[in-house]
Amino acid sequence: MQVNKSKVWPQLGAMAHELPCRVDEVEHLFALLHSIELQAVQLGVPFLEEIMAREALLATWQAQLKASSIQLSALGGYRNLITPDKARRATNIAFLQRCLELAPSLGTTIVATETGTYSRASDWAASPANQGQEAWEALYASLNELLPVAERYSVILALEGHVNHVINTPERLARLLEQFPTPNLQVVLDPYNYLGKEQLPYKELIVASFLQQFKDRFALVHLKDVHQQGAEVDTPAFGHGVFPQNIYLDFLQLQRPDLPLIIEHATVEQFPAILHSLRTWHERTA
């Protein structure tokens, strides 16, 4: 992998649906991104469902993205890939296949999703069944449907793990990537999600190991934090938790400066402090 270091680091972005704009307020959204000095955006649910349902709205987004200097980092088509409800799983797969087809026309080659859970109560709640054979088989089956579409459209499917889900540890992520040795399957760099309560005492070691183990597989970067009781409880805005950010930022700046940092779970009012903190850290370490 050759890293493009031509861009000024850090390139920063936000989740479109977390900003105070409706999906049809495209010009206002992009003006807001510019006003808070952001260069990228991740477009996800529920905006994606509305855009897919309205051709005129899709055309507006396509035109705005083409005309703007804002980079579309990814489509966030988050769906549960292993729900035991087979009809719902089929609907989820169809939605993600549409995301993969649509991504190039919006100017991105990345579609992100979490893998989900085998729980019958929630798409994202922890379940002992996540560690069973049926959950793994469901995940393999879903990827066998999604990856041919990703390959057809030259798009990357980027998977995001979480302590509550079927991909809940770096070891399980590595096992999955070995089963699907294709460049169209990559990883969302979101190490916060792997720090459950039991992992927090070893957080520096776990994060450093994770970053090096998958450093060539990251397609998308998220920036947030971890609750003092672990990711099972919450992943708040950057600077509001106990995550070892210095290790993370050092890695991003030195080894993956090609990837924009998509800031999660932050309000518009929190952005100036986050941006100031990142730029101060950069100036101090440059």
Image (spheres, helix red, strand yellow):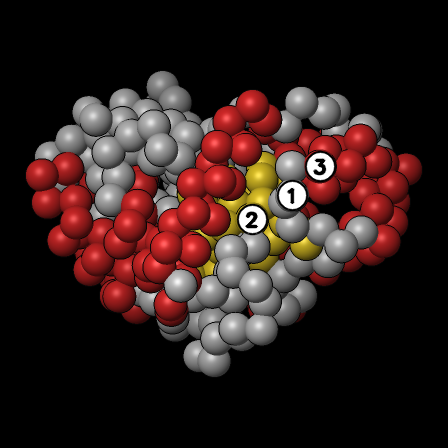
Residue beneath the point at 43% across and 55% down: 283
With respect to residue 91, does 256 lie above or below? below
The foreground one among 253 and 142 is 253
Q: Secondary structure at mark 1?
A: loop
C-alpha separation, residue under disc 1 versus residue under disc 3: 5 Å
Q: Position of residue 73 (x, y in %)?
A: 61, 53
Residue, disc 1: 37
Closest to the observer: 140 or 172?
172
Specify the quadrant of the image occupied by residue 104: bottom right
Q: Is residue 114 left or right of residue 45?
A: left
- Among the two numbered marks 3 and 2 on one chain, the one whose residue lies closer to the N terminus: 2
* Quadrant of the snapshot with the N terminus: bottom left
Q: Which residue is mark 2?
A: 12
- Identify the residue at image location x=36%, y=19%: 121
- Label 3 SS: helix
Tag 2 near tag 1, CB within 8 Å: yes
Which residue is situated farthest in the bottom direction here?
A: 2
Res. 217 in view: no
User: Quick one: which residue is furthest to the front in this view?
Assistant: 284
Residue at the (65%, 37%) spot, across then down: 36
**Label 1 amino acid?**
Glu
Residue 239 in the figure: left or right of residue 86: left
Disc 3 to disc 2: CB gap under 8 Å: no
Q: What's the amino acid at mark 3?
A: Ser
**Vertical comparison of 112 with 187: above or below:** above
Q: Position of residue 219 (x, y in %)?
A: 48, 60
Q: Which residue is mark 3?
A: 35
